[in-house]
Image (cartoon, grey):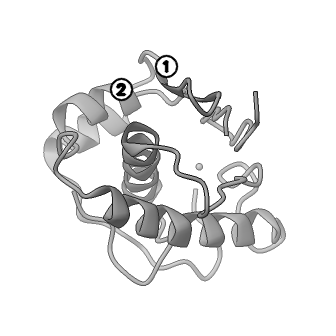
Amino acid sequence: MKVLCTHICRIVILLTGLTACNTARVNHSAPDEETIFRSSTGEPVTIANDSLEYEIIIIEPGFDAWLNSVARPEGYYSQSFLENRNQVYVVNWNQRVREPHRYNPDLYGMIIDYDPHIDYGYEVNYKLYCYFIYFQRKYRQQLAGFIPRI
């Protein structure tokens, strides 16, 4: 099984968090989100693509509740949109991992090995994208030139 990403602080992604210096702040959270963000419990979110032998496991308190109650439903975004955003987020994430003196290594723990030439499928891209949105909103980070919106 290929590893796309391993332990990233509070996220474990197999397949493949509180501020960082010089990072734009994101502060538009709904009240329901704030309750979820303060949560210390939650179930791991697992995604698998058996045909590619990839698996993602996200262990982050509150992410499963956020995914099921706040995030846009599966099918809302096109796969090409998700792939494009994930590629941008991964590049910026990995840059922050490489600069632990500048960005909090507790938030940005490990490189994500996301190959834009591999079709990971809709579910993998959707849940990875949702995690990036959740992460940015919860930890008030901005991984790209656009504000992470739901």
**What is the quadrant of residue 39 in the picture?**
top left
Is residue 121 positioned above or below 114 on the image?
Answer: above
**What is the quadrant of residue 55 in the picture?**
top right
Q: Tell me the residue that label 1 is attached to.
A: 44
Is residue 106 at least partly visible in the picture? Answer: yes
Name the one closer to the observer, 4 or 70. 4
Amino acid identity at mark 2: Asp
Residue at 24% across, 42% down: 33
Check the picture and name the quadrant holding the C terminus.
Answer: bottom left
* Residue 57 in the image, given as x and y percentages of width and height: 57, 26
What is the secondary structure assignment of the residue under circle 2? helix
Task: For marks 2 and 1, give the CA distance.
Answer: 7 Å
What is the secondary structure assignment of the residue under circle 1? loop
Q: Tell me the residue that label 2 is attached to.
A: 64
Name the one closer to the observer, 100 or 126. 126
Amino acid identity at mark 1: Pro
Q: Which mark is residue 20?
A: none
* Residue 100 in the image, given as x and y percentages of width and height: 82, 65
Residue at 61% across, 62% down: 117
Whichever of callouts 2 and 1 sits on the residue coming sooner in the sequence is 1
Asked if the residue at tag 1 contacts the one at tag 2, i.e. Cβ–Cβ closer than 8 Å, the answer is yes
Report whether 49 appears left or right of 94. left
